[in-house]
């Protein structure tokens, strides 16, 4: 890991010449080119898109579990809310409009719906903490799932389909970068400092004038908003959603990605989501046994690196001193 | 009214299964302050060992029960040794993630060995008798009475023996207990053994009530048992049992008097309301007894 950090160091010096904006713009162009001219085959494109979606999910969960130090185990519920609301919008309400407009609106609306559900989880978090809050989030995700199962208009347990395949690589790239950007800025903002202070010591934070209620509420809403966005992207990528997709297993998968990459680190989430998704695909030849090998690798990693790959550390290009402090040190 | 008592009996049966699993969660939490997410899957292994005992080895009820309990106990202790003990001093999150990992491993390892759901033939001669209009089956009677015996045994171990005293001491203050000459690692392993053994027994009970098993049964049942432990106040033995019977009753009664698809909805909504009014569970208080 030290070596990787050393490897990243030149990026700091390079930052003076090559701005992050340029890299992002180039990446977006590349994504556009890949999807426009089919530079990669569909399978590879699918994996890239899944990495992006998983990255959004991981970051959103990391905000609550890593930065705020709470333990949410029900993020699949937010994802489900986003996926269903955006799918219903794009299939039933906005179907007659051009997909160029429908898709971002549907995904945004899905994110907002998930944000509202997140608000409902944030309220109990004022009183409970730790394992009890974990149960509250779990219960909420089960309730979301149960409610969907009981609404026949969206297919109930059978699931919902009819979405066009609107999720493309440039869109996933756009949302991924937007998520990284917004969550990074959120964490280094005044509110974000509040989030960190809640993690370190909630009572002390309260006493020093942090409005912990607002901070928790905002963190939950932002986190669930992005989980909802990921849900919307997922629904329009796979083109079929059912309540069974968004069960505890999905939440567990997110937890694994967060803790694999390391809590409290954006770079960790990026590495965690990418490693997990790629490893899962790479182990595909093992067939049914791949899900037995995967957790063994995870356990080994945890025993030898208990804090996850990055654990509370950040890549230089994501820290706020990047571009300002980097030059002065030399 | 008779319908109600009939359902109450079913609730007692489901509650007993939840209680046996919830005890494992709450005991491990008591000594390690850690949620063992693999516990639900240990329960699932118990159900599969029951299948092996009945179908492959042709054993009768008591040997099957003992075999499942012994097997799951060994598995639980091995899990603790391999996946949790190296992380004793690591951040809490890493032990949680290894426990999730162990859970996923057990599920898919079992899936690899048995890709199709398994049917377990009745373990006991199945007949039911009529008690004041309520029909009681041998399975229900066995489940409820054996759970009571096991819970009583656990209560005696925790409250009346030196080992139990050591467990309670570790739960009260883990820092100072080693200084008193208590072998902490051994006591923790023993706690895992007790908890897993109960989980194995629950696997057999579950397989009697719902004879078709697959490797994923541990997920939802495990989480529900965990919820029971939280309702009662996690770390508290009596709380776990109380919470399990409450959850069992709520689930069965919802299914009995409302459309059965509302079962989870009502159960979890009640849980949320309860946690709003009693954020630390029913018995989770400072002066309460902990393992």
Image: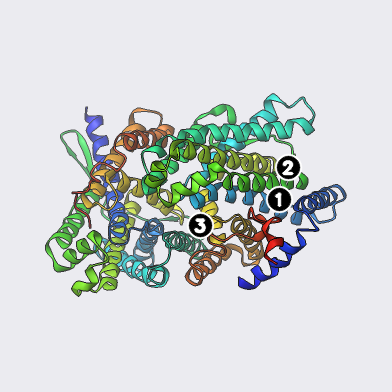
Give the spatial CA distance, label 2 vs label 3: 35 Å
Disc 2, SS:
loop
Q: Tell me the quarter of the image containing the C terminus of chain B.
A: bottom left
Where does residue A29 sit, x and y in percent of width and height? 83, 49
Where does residue A301 sit, x and y in percent of width and height? 53, 69
Q: Is A184 left, or right, of B115 in this rendering? A: right
The residue that disc 3 covers is B116
Q: Nearer the viewer, mark 2 or mark 3?
A: 2
Disc 1, SS:
helix
Where does residue B188 sit, x and y in percent of width and height? 28, 67
Q: Tell me the quarter of the image containing the N terminus of chain B.
A: top left
Where does residue A269 sit, x and y in percent of width and height? 60, 56
The residue sitting at 70% across, 69% down in the picture is A7
- Which mark is drawn over residue B153? none
Q: Is residue B127 visible?
A: no
Is label 1 in contact with label 2 (beta carbons under 8 Å)? yes
> B5 or A213, which is in the foreground?
A213
Is label 2 in contact with label 3 (beta carbons under 8 Å)? no
The residue that disc 1 covers is A49
- Which mark is drawn over residue A167? 2
Dividing the picture into quadrants, the one containing residue A235 is top right
Disc 3, SS:
loop
């Amino acid at each position: 890991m030290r070596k990787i950090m050393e490897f990243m160091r030149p990026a700091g010096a390079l930052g003076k010449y090559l701005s992050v904006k340029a890299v992002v713009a180039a990446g977006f162009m590349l994504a556009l080119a890949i999807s426009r001219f089919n530079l990669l085959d569909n399978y590879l494109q699918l994996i890239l898109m899944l990495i992006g979606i998983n990255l959004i999910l991981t970051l959103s969960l990391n905000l609550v579990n890593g930065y705020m130090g709470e333990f949410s185990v029900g993020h699949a519920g937010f994802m489900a809310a986003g996926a269903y609301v955006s799918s219903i919008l794009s299939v039933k309400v906005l179907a007659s409009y051009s997909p160029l407009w429908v898709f971002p609106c549907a995904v945004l609306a899905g994110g907002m719906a998930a944000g509202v559900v997140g608000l409902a989880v944030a309220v109990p978090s004022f009183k409970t903490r730790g394992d009890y809050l974990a149960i509250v989030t779990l219960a909420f995700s089960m309730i979301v799932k149960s409610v969907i199962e009981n609404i026949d208009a969206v297919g109930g347990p059978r699931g919902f389909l009819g979405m066009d395949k609107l999720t493309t690589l440039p869109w996933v790239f756009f949302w991924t970068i937007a998520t990284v950007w917004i969550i990074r800025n959120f964490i280094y903002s005044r509110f974000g400092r509040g989030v960190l202070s809640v993690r370190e010591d909630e009572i002390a934070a309260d006493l020093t004038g942090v409005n912990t209620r607002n901070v928790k509420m905002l963190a939950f809403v932002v986190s669930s908003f992005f989980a909802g966005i990921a849900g919307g992207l997922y629904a329009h990528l796979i083109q079929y959603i059912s309540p069974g997709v968004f069960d505890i297993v999905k939440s567990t998968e997110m937890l694994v990605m967060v803790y694999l990459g390391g809590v409290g680190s954006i770079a960790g989430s990026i590495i965690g989501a990418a490693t997990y998704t790629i490893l899962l695909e790479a182990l595909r030849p093992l067939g049914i046994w791949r899900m037995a090998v995967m957790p063994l690798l995870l356990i080994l990693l945890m025993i030898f690196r208990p804090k996850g790959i990055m654990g509370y550390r950040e890549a230089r290009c994501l820290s706020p001193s990047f571009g300002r402090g980097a030059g002065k040190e030399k | 009214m008779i319908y109600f008592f009939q359902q109450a009996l079913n609730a007692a049966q489901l509650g007993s299964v939840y209680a046996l699993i919830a005890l494992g969660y709450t005991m491990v939490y008591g000594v390690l302050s850690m949620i063992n997410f693999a516990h639900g899957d240990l329960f699932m292994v118990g159900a599969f060992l029951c299948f092996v005992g009945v179908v492959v080895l042709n054993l009768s009820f008591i040997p099957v029960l003992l075999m499942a309990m012994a097997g799951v106990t060994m598995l639980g202790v091995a899990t603790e040794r391999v996946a949790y003990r190296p992380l004793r001093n690591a951040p809490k999150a890493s032990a949680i993630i290894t426990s999730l990992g162990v859970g996923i491993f057990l599920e898919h390892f079992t899936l690899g060995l048995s890709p199709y759901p398994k049917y377990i033939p009745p373990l006991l001669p199945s007949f039911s008798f009529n008690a004041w209009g309520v029909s009681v089956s041998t399975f229900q009677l066995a489940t409820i009475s054996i759970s009571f015996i096991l819970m009583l045994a656990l209560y005696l171990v925790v409250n009346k023996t030196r080992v139990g005293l050591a467990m309670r001491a570790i739960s009260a203050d883990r820092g100072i207990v080693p200084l008193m000459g208590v072998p902490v690692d051994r006591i923790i392993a023993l706690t895992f053994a007790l908890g897993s053994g109960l989980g194995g027994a629950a696997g057999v009970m579950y397989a009697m009530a719902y004879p078709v098993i697959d490797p994923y049964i541990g997920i939802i049942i495990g989480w529900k048992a965990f919820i029971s432990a939280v309702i009662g106040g996690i770390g508290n033995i009596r709380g776990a049992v109380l919470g399990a019977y409450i959850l069992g009753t709520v689930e069965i009664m919802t299914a009995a008097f409302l459309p059965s698809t509302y079962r989870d909805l009502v159960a979890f909504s009640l849980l949320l309301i309860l946690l709003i009014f009693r954020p630390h569970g029913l018995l989770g208080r400072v002066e309460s007894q902990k393992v």
